[in-house]
Image (tube, rainbow, N blue to C red):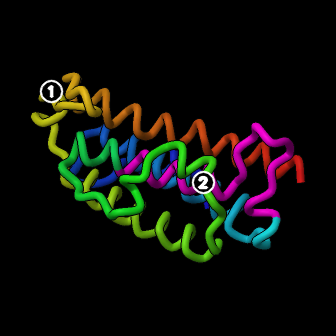
């Protein structure tokens, strides 16, 4: 199977949205291949105290992506996604199955919401963060994908350290 970026455009969405969908699919493939098969102990292992565990990175990818999706796409947030970055990355370990299930549910919702984005909506400004700073929807969606890709890369690197 080719990498998602080599797949055809997603039908019915603008090309930029198709590229973002393919980027989200790639994040999911990376996590499936580098994180989800780990045993519990390895999922929460830290190479040193200041480092984030793979489980925390997965939790953060899902939570931060949902928060950005709430700003840009009007998605609702499950309670766990309101706990924020510090809990996601540094909070207590949870059963891996819970974190993986949350990620998959979040990704299904994000992919569905991205498929509804139309060209004319991309230039609209949306309020972002607790300060409500306004930014073009396209920039927020692009950041969502880039941020998830960034942390997926950290997952891959951490897995290689095991």
Q: Earlier in the sequence, mark 2 or mark 1?
A: 2
Q: In this orientation, which residue lies closer to the viewer: 62 or 56?
A: 56
Q: How many marks?
A: 2
Residue 133 sits in quarter: top left
Residue in the foreground of this view, choosing between 107 and 129: 129
Image quadrant in which the C terminus is located: bottom right
Please tell me which residue lies in front, 62 or 79: 79
Residue under the image location 48 percent in, 51 percent down? 7
Q: In this view, does 14 lie above or below 25?
A: above
Q: Where residue 69 appears, x then y in whole percent? A: 30, 47
Point out the image quarter for the N terminus: bottom right
Q: What stretch is highlighted in magenta?
A: 42-66
In the rendered image, residue 63 lying in the magenta stretch gets the answer: yes
Q: Which of the 4 quarters of the picture holds residue 113?
A: bottom left
Gap between marks 2 and 1, in whole Å? 33 Å
* Residue 103 located left or right of residue 106: right
Label 2: how many Cα within 10 Å (few below 14, some 14–19, many 20+):
some
83 to 140, vertically: above or below: below
Q: Name the residue under label 2.
A: 91
With respect to residue 104, does 65 lie above or below? Answer: above
Mark 1 — residue?
125
* Residue at the image position 85 percent from the left and 42 percent from the top: 48
Residue most extreme to the right: 162
């Amino acid at each position: 199977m080719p990498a998602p970026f080599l797949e055809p455009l997603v039908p019915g969405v603008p090309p930029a949205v198709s590229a973002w969908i393919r980027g989200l699919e790639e994040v999911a493939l990376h996590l499936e291949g580098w994180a989800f098969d780990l045993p519990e102990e390895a999922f929460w292992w830290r190479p040193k105290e200041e480092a984030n565990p793979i489980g925390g990175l997965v939790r953060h990818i899902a939570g931060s992506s949902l928060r950005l999706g709430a700003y840009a796409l009007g998605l609702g947030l499950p309670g766990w996604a309101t706990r924020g970055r510090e809990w996601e990355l540094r909070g207590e370990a949870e059963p891996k199955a819970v974190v993986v299930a949350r990620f998959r549910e979040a990704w299904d919702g994000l992919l569905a919401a991205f498929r509804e984005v139309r060209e004319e909506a991309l230039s609209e400004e949306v309020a972002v963060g607790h300060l409500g700073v306004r930014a073009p929807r396209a920039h927020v969606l692009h950041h969502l994908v880039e941020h998830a890709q960034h942390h997926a890369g950290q997952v891959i690197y951490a897995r290689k350290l095991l």
